[in-house]
Amino acid sequence: MTLLADLLSTVFERRYRFIAAGKADGRPLEKLTADLIGATGESAGLTAAREILGRYEGWDDDGKRAFFRHLAEDMRISPEALRDALAAYEEGQSKFSYRRLMQAAEPPRQELIRRLNQLPGATGSLVRMRADLLRLGRGDDALEALDLDFRHLFASWFNRGFLVLRPINWESPAHILEKIIAYEAVHAIETWDDLRRRLEPPDRRCFAFFHPAMPNEPLIFVEVALTRGVPGSVQGLLAEGRDALDATEADTAVFYSISNCQAGLASISFGNSLIKQVAADLSMALPGLRTFVTLSPIPGLTRWLDDVRPEAERTDGDLMKTLAAHYLYAVKREDGLPRDPVARFHLGNGALIHKLHADADLSDKGREQSAGVMVNYLYDLDRVLQNHERFASDHVVAASSEVRSLSAAAARKLN
Amino acid sequence: MTLLADLLSTVFERRYRFIAAGKADGRPLEKLTADLIGATGESAGLTAAREILGRYEGWDDDGKRAFFRHLAEDMRISPEALRDALAAYEEGQSKFSYRRLMQAAEPPRQELIRRLNQLPGATGSLVRMRADLLRLGRGDDALEALDLDFRHLFASWFNRGFLVLRPINWESPAHILEKIIAYEAVHAIETWDDLRRRLEPPDRRCFAFFHPAMPNEPLIFVEVALTRGVPGSVQGLLAEGRDALDATEADTAVFYSISNCQAGLASISFGNSLIKQVAADLSMALPGLRTFVTLSPIPGLTRWLDDVRPEAERTDGDLMKTLAAHYLYAVKREDGLPRDPVARFHLGNGALIHKLHADADLSDKGREQSAGVMVNYLYDLDRVLQNHERFASDHVVAASSEVRSLSAAAARKLN
Amino acid sequence: MTLLADLLSTVFERRYRFIAAGKADGRPLEKLTADLIGATGESAGLTAAREILGRYEGWDDDGKRAFFRHLAEDMRISPEALRDALAAYEEGQSKFSYRRLMQAAEPPRQELIRRLNQLPGATGSLVRMRADLLRLGRGDDALEALDLDFRHLFASWFNRGFLVLRPINWESPAHILEKIIAYEAVHAIETWDDLRRRLEPPDRRCFAFFHPAMPNEPLIFVEVALTRGVPGSVQGLLAEGRDALDATEADTAVFYSISNCQAGLASISFGNSLIKQVAADLSMALPGLRTFVTLSPIPGLTRWLDDVRPEAERTDGDLMKTLAAHYLYAVKREDGLPRDPVARFHLGNGALIHKLHADADLSDKGREQSAGVMVNYLYDLDRVLQNHERFASDHVVAASSEVRSLSAAAARKLN
Amino acid sequence: MTLLADLLSTVFERRYRFIAAGKADGRPLEKLTADLIGATGESAGLTAAREILGRYEGWDDDGKRAFFRHLAEDMRISPEALRDALAAYEEGQSKFSYRRLMQAAEPPRQELIRRLNQLPGATGSLVRMRADLLRLGRGDDALEALDLDFRHLFASWFNRGFLVLRPINWESPAHILEKIIAYEAVHAIETWDDLRRRLEPPDRRCFAFFHPAMPNEPLIFVEVALTRGVPGSVQGLLAEGRDALDATEADTAVFYSISNCQAGLASISFGNSLIKQVAADLSMALPGLRTFVTLSPIPGLTRWLDDVRPEAERTDGDLMKTLAAHYLYAVKREDGLPRDPVARFHLGNGALIHKLHADADLSDKGREQSAGVMVNYLYDLDRVLQNHERFASDHVVAASSEVRSLSAAAARKLN
């Protein structure tokens, strides 16, 4: 509500004037970060935190790089102090020697990041800060090491137990919906009407994870189509003017798009339970649902074909489908895991490779990456845990007999 | 809503049946904790987490002690591994050597606690677990060291930036209110009518901090009386049948009780901003408020008197008030900080010792601890930060001239 | 939230200062009511409405009676004007003659009441006003006629389509719960602990109807116990220290208390769908529920016995149960409907008389009114509509064969 | 939330299956309406109501016209019965004779409409039904008389005291926002980006009235721009790429568009307090606001010019502005009220004609209706009530001296 927003923003302003009194000041950055870490009271700490984050917002990439460099070099671990603390600890393991060891073993920049986070609203700023760091620090060993500290803290803060699953629909606030438009990574949403077609019909659903400290920022979302039978084409699924199904008549939930929203949360794993939670919620609300599948791209298919069969005719749908089955089922990386990243994600979640479809994604991107082929990964309630474990421990890829046959046929052709 | 609660509890039940399939199992504890830490998938991890937390609930103190002992001894840091990682890091500081160092420097039990926390609702269980640990581990060096790990994680999870300030009033849910009754530590609340007298009148307020993952558990709360002038007696403040003031006519907000609710969050500092936030919010909503004071007990007064003036007549109000001024203003611990713990808290927050009142708390507890004397600490917007800093850096105790005069008079008597 | 409440109450105050400017004024009541009806603008109308309702609050019964008398006598219909309008309408039925007729046919006091209701929050005041009118006007023909106008308007405002069904539980706001304590009319709630025993256990539910313009006032509520099998004693149902049932194991929902909350809404029928809605909601949330029954008092039993069998031994449970069956099933008023008011309510709703229990309510009230006997009315989904219709059109009382047999046996004894 | 929506829609479905059992039936319409009015139980009534509203949805205009004709002719008042009841009442005024008179004086179709409204969600259907009636019944005396009954009931149901003022902003649900786009009647909103420019900037506000029984349907809304100084051009106000103002720096709130949303609520006056409420709320939230004005079209200006000065050059801004001042201030209808409808609305609300602007609305519609001239009506807190009363009683038009001078100058030219 605008009225309350007005009132409350004034409250917050006052509150911070009270708590974090003081205007922008002239302290050098090194003094500010030292003061923030050393601050014994919240007021002084919040003042320094606000000053640092405020300056950060104003910096260009060079300024940001200099800041990261300061964290990376001046606020790292001291090997000498750690060696001494470790020696003392080995001499006598006590509460005191352990506390000293803990302190020596954690770089001061971790405490700095925690204290920046005390400022209300800072969590989102820190996530954006890490997005900058990932972008600017690529290939720079010191900055990549600094990122490990961000990542360590974020893994704790964005712990699965702290996240909230929320449906996104046509009754969601516009400022959330525009982020769905912006973040959709698999099948682009062009307009608000396009968005409405994915949210409003009775046979469509969308769910996102949120963190309480970033209530206006979806972290990851999944789009679902409710269908009768397993569909084999994404353009069919999203066609304008199609007839919507009554949700209670659907027997299948199709997860046709999963998008991460926050570059700054890369490698923080919270997405792998999204599909399973959504499947569980849907199966409760709509007991008629029997089958939970994805309709997924195969992003590495044509790249692999370029390696092994550059001459294969990519418009031959049947051929492509057969080769795709083999690629997903049998082609591995050096570490023994499937070469395709989307396959690794769903197989790691306990899904199985269910079915392949030729000419299923006729968009430019679909043709280019996957030669138009798409795949359904099946989430079978009763087998998810077992599939996952066999994949995790022995790299066993679960697949339907149809997929296995296709792969075998392809193997014969390829050899 | 009960209906939704029914529906949703079924959803959650299903959801976890889906995600964390499997019944209570016979794995030994050591296997379970190893499996939880080693789990590569969320499902397996959640299953192990649920099993561990479920067993924990059922254990008596011996069982819990054994569990803590397992964490303390089997899941601690390996000095050898850390020494090797440190050596490698010193040899060449790289992303990889740093990652190895980070891993070696953190005991596996920290990851264990983080993974337990992935189970929805587990945060509250872990807070209760730490309360057990503090109780059972007192004086046990290994368990106190283990507590340092809990505390380290909790400081990150209960970061000030993640907390939410919420008013508590007569429109709050009963299950929250009964916790206010249970947790009030300063001036006990006997009945629901007693509670209502502290919440419903137009000149009463109460605020609490909550964490989003424990929405039904206040962490700390403060009770406020709105008055004209600074009151000098808590019994007067809480008298039955008193006439309530219209809030807009009040010029003073009296913080007459602050209570921590969670034993398991001991030493996690988030309370020191509570008063200042509440003061800021109140001053916004009620611009007539000019003065923000506490009406506080002096818990260490009679104990100190027993040491220095056992013969002093505790019923001589004026004498007690003079001695109390001295005790608060001038009596220090070895580290140079005030001897009285409540004084340390408010002075550390930037308040000043404003005024003393004889015969101000005539309850048994009030007479016994404080000889009936109470004190107002004053939160003066314009001086809070400066007071705090002088106290933090130089142990300077801020006090009104009245208090300083009383203290000087007492000093003359005592010498 | 208190902060918002403070801010918002200031908003509302300002808003009405703006809209309904002006202080309490000296206009005589007759002038005020005339001004309110004649007001062409909202500001003037709200000013008059606020003045009238403000004065009303301050009046004693004599003042209120005088106000009602003014409405009853000075603001009634004008028979002459109505006769003229009717003549004109009969001469030529047109939009204009009909509008004139409508105006002449409605007493000015109806418009007065509607305009009083424009003041935010006035709906509750008007409901309390009607409670006064019912109390003060009993037996006074002019005031009872005035009440017909209140009732006519309230029937429109409290139309079933405007009401909201909300669960009441231990998470409900305290200020709502204290009204449940105050309004419980069947089995008194003595303390907050008593209330908690009816709301918090997993096998207890409570639901109330609310009107959006009176969000803090339940209109009617029903208390439900979830059980295995149909219980035969209310003291058993409410026993302290009983073992609660897991809700999913219950097969029966027992509606053991229904209470109207607003004397000012007497004869406005919105309660008759409460049980059926609650039954429908519960059967959705808890598919294990098969049977929906009441456990009801028989308030007119002993009075009837005083008439027909004053000598019957009221402590003979079996005898009383047999006679009660007959009383409920076969004893009618002159209009052919059952003599017992609770029986009329449930049979009119489509329930059937299912089972009688001797020694089922051993409270003083239970012994005195019902000789300790209680009855289950059964709501059978598949027969509710048919039962209702046969009762409504032909006064057919639906009862189980057991009840019919008991009644026949009693009839033999009584003749 | 979609999950809850799914669950709840199932609940509602069940609930109505329970309450209003029975499928679409073959009863003729006349039987259905008679059954609905005669229904003694809620179940039977809801069944009939659902059947009637369901059939209505399916009818084309002829079907609807026949339904209205049925209400208009078969369910009207009986003059004979009313004459008899009136005679009885005149003979002896009693509760019983009054009740009989009330019943005879109200046509059965009013009770029919009230009973249709018992079906949850029916209020919106009835509003749409009246929109049809207004459209189809124009000029038909019997249907216009029928509309008087709808209007009578709606005035009671949409009583100001039942409405809720809610801010509309970029955080509002998309399904509400698309209605704002659809209903904006003054300055059309073309796209979602256009909408965002009216809602998202810190110097823009929008507020709407809602009725609790139609929570997804705004009834009327006003768009506000916060500015420094009174603006003289709507295109300037809405320009793309303009710099937004910090809301706390604004001294003026400009109500630049008010739109009714529901054709079916025509002539139900609830809009006249909207501006004053919004002004009061804004002045509370933003104490810097000093001036509350509209920036309004003058829809009747050129039509009037066509009558009195067809030859006047409409592109001569100064001339048009002078004539507009005269038109608004001095040109009246036969009943003595201003000829311009927007002027009547704001003057009736207590505003005054503040200032005119040439070339202020250069859209096609603005040139065509108002020769590009716009006007500010000023809402002056301290004079609103007095202005209103002088306008209501004596048709005195309040205007600034500038406007009065312009009007006088124009009068000299025109004579």
Image (cartoon, coloured by chain):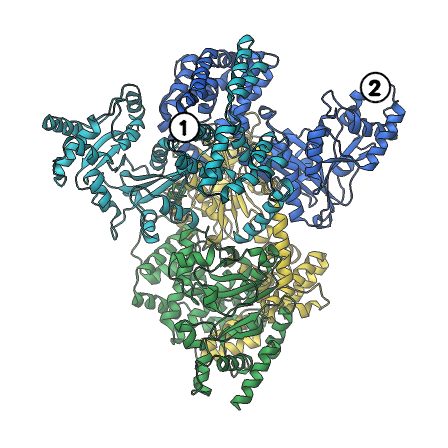
Chain colours: A green, B yellow, C blue, D cyan
The disc placed on residue B371 is none
Q: Rate crowding at label 2 as few (under 14), some (14 to 19) or many (20 or more) other CA atoms within 10 Å.
A: few
Determine whether, in the image, residue B173 is placed left or right of residue B276.
right
**Residue B34, image quadrant:** bottom right
Q: Are marks 2 and 1 in contact (CB under 8 Å)?
A: no
Question: Residue B365: where, in percent of width, then height?
Answer: 61, 37
Chain of the residue under the numbered disc 2 shown in the image: C
Q: Give the SS element for disc 1.
A: helix
Residue at mark 1: D141
Q: Nearer the viewer, residue C176 or A182?
A: A182
Residue at mark 2: C308
Are labels 2 and 1 on one chain?
no
Chain of the residue under the numbered disc 1 shown in the image: D
Question: Residue D199: where, in percent of width, then height?
Answer: 34, 47
Q: Quadrant of the N terminus of chain B?
A: top right
Compared to residue C20, the image places residue A110 above or below, namely: below
Question: Residue A12: where, in percent of width, then height?
Answer: 40, 46
**Residue A30, image quadrant:** bottom left
* Residue B236 in view (yes/no): no
Question: Residue D217: where, in percent of width, then height?
Answer: 44, 42
Determine whether, in the image, residue A17 is placed left or right of residue B263.
left
- Residue sitting at 45 percent across and 63 percent down? A238
Compared to residue C329, the image places residue A144 above or below, namely: below
Q: How many marks?
A: 2
Q: Give the SS element for disc 2.
A: helix
* Residue D408 in view (yes/no): yes
Q: Nearer the viewer, residue D138 or D124?
A: D138
Residue type at mark 1: give it: Asp
Residue type at mark 2: give it: Val
Determine whether, in the image, residue A300 is placed left or right of residue A397.
left
